[in-house]
Image: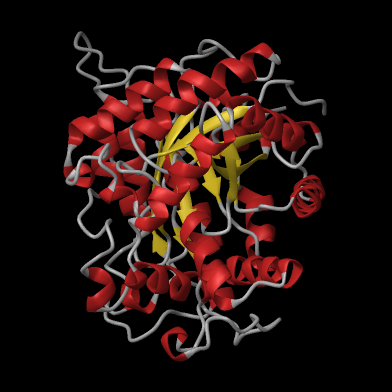
Amino acid sequence: MRRNDEMKLGLYLAPAGYHGGAWRDPSAPADARVDIDQYAHLAALAESAAFHFVFLADHQGIIGDHAAIARVSGNDEFEPITLLSALSSRTQDIGLVATATTTYYQPYHLARMFASLDHLSRGRAAWNIVTSASNFEAQNFGEKELPDHDARYARAREFVEVAKGLWDTWQDDAFIRDKQSGIYADTAKLHLLNHGGNHFSVRGPLNIGRPPQGYPVLVQAGASDAGIAFAAEVGEVVFTAEPSLENGKQYYRTLKQKARAVGRDDDQVLVMPGIIPIVGRTKQEASEKLRRLQSHTHIDVLMRTADLWLGSATDLRSMNLDSLVPEALPQTNFIQSRQKLLLDLAARQKFTWRQLIRVISDSCGHLLVVGTPDEIANTMVDVFDQHAADGFNVLPATAPSGLKDFVELVVPELRQRGKFRSKYSGKTLRENLGLKRPLNRFTQAVLSIRP
């Protein structure tokens, strides 16, 4: 199916910026992560530019040792669904994507919370489906370490099916609220789920009506073999990290092929890699912005970030940082695809440990573009036109300054090329993304047995 010629854009909502040194930048509020006005300001900037959504990442705990914790921003931040519920009343059109783990929640909890967010926002909610990825999280939930990678995905697959079943337990028009008759709900349109599986036993029904979108938009970030298979089955927006155009094109083809194999249309699975645009009116100005951010990033932050994404048993502090990075490390139980991506990048570029650690700090494996508005727009259009992306999740290195630069300088360039819209086209996030509203499984079952 032919896709729309306009790319989709999301904002990764890091209130001080995505770079590890951003919170120390003079333009960023030091307490940005616990300042609702800062989040609302960034969401308003993105909404003014007709971004499709804002995206909130999350972990169920603090990751790292005390040396890193002392210097890393992000260990005092709002829970995403709570925050986006507040932002739903301070925005009108932009989608609201919250990250929530299938490893340590229960399906009923999340189905109810996301249904509530979808009602509060009048159809703008989305769930970024993740499996927890750190033993620091496991230790907050009575475990010493995470279940293994494939086991986490098996649980996630069943979890999503249960959540979708719960969202269907009330038909769209079940709550009639008729004062004259005294009938509040038509129980002929109520369905018990009665799910019994390997991981969950859930009776249902949900104690809130079906979400305005049917289901909140389902976002995924799978790039390992298990992750790609899962994303192809359930992901409607797929958030990837890929700095290489050729690898991005291969991922795009693979994911779309796997989605078609399970009966899904290409335009119902949107690939949106992360991009970190550092914008300057000249290349030199943009490069100086990056250099300044690097000067704000302490060695403890550099090491903690590298340890996190590489998942290596190697003690980086004892390494000769000017030696070449090996082609392989012990496989991580964290995000396996990101470790492979970073090691492949190091092999292609013949990086030393010092160089790789710096790249991880600057981009965490996402596409980093440092340049003029024209250069950044050209890169985005090239990735889009060569079918390595349906759009981008924009990760400003600093906020609000980096986002303001992107909105004021890059977005007009994209519009001039006919690649980005100037206004919202629908009321719900699904409508704005061009995604179908799912039918209720119980309604379909009734229709299928009628003569």
Q: Residue at x 42, y 86 (%)?
A: 317
* 391 to the left or right of 190: right
Q: Position of residue 189 (x, y in %)?
A: 42, 30
Q: In front: 120, or 237?
A: 237
Quarter of the image for the N terminus: give it.
top right
Is 40 rendered above or below residue 197?
A: above
Quarter of the figure with residue 200: bottom left
The answer to whether residue 335 of the structure is visible from this angle is no
* 243 to the left or right of 88: right
Q: Position of residue 44 (x, y in %)?
A: 33, 22
Please, which residue is most extreme toward the front here?
A: 284
Q: In front: 369, or 218?
A: 369
Is 73 rendered above or below residue 165?
A: below
Quarter of the image for the C terminus: give it.
top right
Q: Residue at x 66, y 31 (%)?
A: 375
Quarter of the figure with residue 307: bottom left
Q: Position of residue 312 (x, y in %)?
A: 52, 83
The answer to whether residue 375 of the structure is visible from this angle is yes
Q: In front: 119, or 92?
A: 92
* 68 to the left or right of 354: left
* 44 to the left or right of 349: left
Q: Residue at x 22, y 42 (%)?
A: 32
Q: How many marks?
A: 0
Quarter of the figure with residue 29: top left
Please, which residue is most extreme toward the bottom here?
A: 318
Is 30 rendered above or below residue 89?
A: below
Q: Position of residue 336 (x, y in %)?
A: 59, 72
What color scheme is it?
A: secondary structure
